[in-house]
Image (cartoon, grey):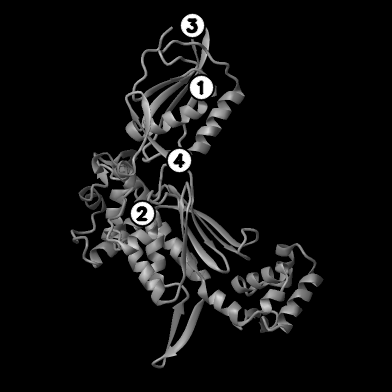
């Protein structure tokens, strides 16, 4: 039996011995057409020769595709029969161009797979707004909108003047913004305003700079509008604030500039990939605050490029970005990073980032933590368990010996001994008696 000729969306491999080459073909077809079909057990001329197929074989192909193709895809892999000969059929699709295979980018030309030149690679980021992912329609309708979330957006957008106040008619406004079409929500509208909680946000505080002991962890669901506020409020609650008396008034200053914090949080939600199961993450460590965006940073660029050069944003979700621009939650034309870097430099806050294969982490360094350790080296003599208790008390000052004992899985006597040591060294002091709390000193 003959399956025809290879073309730009069809590829044949004699066997899974050519799996490495097959992965390149998958990558190339995704970058050219966003879809394709590949068969193992078929000669290049289309003749079916058959292929040994076991459950292990199918799992190995699935694993290799997961490990090699970035962004990740979820192909359909199955055993099919042609004239009593078994072959493996791999069907795949994806909308998150560009795709790479083990870090290299390819594109399909006729039945060949070619490496993509750098200049052509940049073009793959220029999405066609008419076919962009976030403009596609869902099966949800206006009844699935969370009106409180819309009201929050509408008040901000009209107050700042970026959206004309035409009366708070949510359905009309959403239609005018292109977020609802033919009575159905676009993907952008669904993730921005839906009452169905389409996004997961995980937030945690760690006792040390290792992801070992949680002091606090929360996992909540919501839409973009609500979760941006949840993330900001959580960090504001956990970071340090300095109180000063200025002109006879008490002024509290956060260790991280709030405007920069908000910009990075909103940027994360604006540029994320929403067709995967990856979660947004806020991770607070003693020395840093990491904001994880499940959306890769534009290939060939770093945050510094947007600071040093006049570059336009590389937009993944144009409709989401346009909406958040109206409410002043993000800035246009790639200026957000410039503003963040300038403000953090002014406030002596260090910045770092991690560009991973599945996401991007922006990191604020907690300079107050480093300054305190430079001036005071006593902490170096503390044991790891004592540092953990100190961190617990910073975040939960009303913790009792019983609570600490349960969390640390130590006896009450051991906990009391560690508390005594911390008091003697001047790290903590007790305020009040039975209903009092622990105060962690800033020395």
Residue 40: percent from the left, percent from the top? 49, 19
Query: Given this view, does label 1 or label 4 mark the residue nearer the observer?
Result: 4
The earlier-in-sequence mark between 1 and 4 is 4
The earlier-in-sequence mark between 3 and 4 is 4
Q: Residues within 10 Å of mark 2 (few under 14, many from 20)?
A: many
What distance separates the C-alpha of mark 1 from that of mark 2?
36 Å
Q: Mark 4: which secondary structure?
A: strand
Is mark 1 in CB contact (under 8 Å) with mark 4? no
Q: How crowded is mark 3: few (under 14 residues within 10 Å), some or many (20 or more)?
A: few
Query: Given this view, does label 2 or label 3 mark the residue nearer the observer?
Result: 3
Can you identify the residue that label 4 sits on? 70
Q: Which residue is drawn at 36% across and 15% down?
A: 5
Q: Residue at x 74, y 84 (%)?
A: 424
What distance separates the C-alpha of mark 3 from that of mark 1?
16 Å
Q: Residues within 10 Å of mark 1 (few under 14, many from 20)?
A: some
The earlier-in-sequence mark between 4 and 2 is 4
Which of the two residues, 35 or 156, is positioned nearer the viewer here?
35
Can you identify the residue that label 2 sits on? 270
Is mark 2 in CB contact (under 8 Å) with mark 3? no
């Amino acid at each position: 039996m003959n399956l025809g000729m290879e073309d730009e969306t069809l590829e044949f491999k004699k066997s899974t011995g050519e799996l490495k080459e097959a992965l390149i073909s998958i990558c190339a077809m995704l970058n050219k057409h966003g879809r394709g079909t590949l068969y193992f057990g078929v000669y290049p001329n289309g003749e079916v020769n058959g292929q040994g197929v076991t459950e292990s074989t199918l799992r190995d192909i699935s694993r290799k595709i997961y490990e090699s193709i970035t962004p990740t895809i979820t192909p359909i892999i199955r055993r099919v029969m042609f004239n009593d000969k078994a072959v493996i059929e791999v069907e795949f699709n994806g909308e998150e161009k560009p795709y790479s295979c083990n870090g290299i980018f390819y594109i399909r030309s006729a039945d060949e797979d070619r490496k993509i030149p750098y200049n052509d690679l940049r073009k793959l980021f220029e999405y066609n707004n008419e076919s962009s992912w976030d403009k596609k329609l869902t099966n949800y309708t206006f009844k699935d909108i969370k009106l409180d979330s819309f009201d929050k957006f509408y008040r901000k957008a009209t107050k700042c003047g970026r959206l004309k106040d035409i009366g708070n008619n949510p359905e009309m406004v959403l239609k005018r913004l292109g977020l609802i079409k033919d009575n159905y929500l676009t993907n952008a509208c669904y993730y921005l305003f839906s009452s169905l909680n389409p996004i997961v946000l995980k937030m945690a505080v760690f006792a040390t700079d290792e992801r070992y002991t949680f002091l606090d962890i929360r996992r909540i669901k919501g839409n973009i509008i609500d979760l941006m506020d949840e993330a900001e409020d959580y960090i504001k609650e956990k970071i340090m604030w300095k109180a000063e008396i200025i002109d006879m008034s008490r002024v509290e200053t956060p260790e991280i500039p709030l405007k920069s914090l908000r910009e990075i949080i909103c940027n994360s939600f604006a540029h994320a990939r929403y067709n995967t199961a990856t979660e947004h993450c806020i991770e607070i460590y003693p020395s840093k605050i990491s904001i994880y965006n499940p959306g890769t940073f534009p290939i060939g660029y770093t945050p510094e490029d947007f600071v040093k050069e006049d570059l336009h944003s590389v937009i993944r979700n144009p409709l989401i970005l346009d909406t958040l621009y109206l409410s002043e939650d993000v800035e246009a034309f790639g200026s957000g990073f410039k503003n963040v870097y300038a403000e953090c430099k002014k406030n002596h806050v260090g910045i770092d980032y991690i560009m991973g294969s599945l996401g991007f982490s922006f990191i604020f360094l907690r300079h107050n933590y480093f300054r305190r350790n430079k001036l005071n080296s006593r902490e170096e003599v503390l044991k790891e368990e004592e540092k953990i208790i100190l961190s617990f008390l910073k975040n939960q000052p009303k913790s009792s010996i019983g609570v600490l004992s349960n969390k640390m899985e130590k006896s009450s006597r051991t906990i009391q001994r560690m508390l005594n040591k911390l008091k003697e060294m001047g790290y903590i002091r007790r305020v009040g008696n039975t209903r009092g709390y622990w105060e962690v000193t800033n020395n």
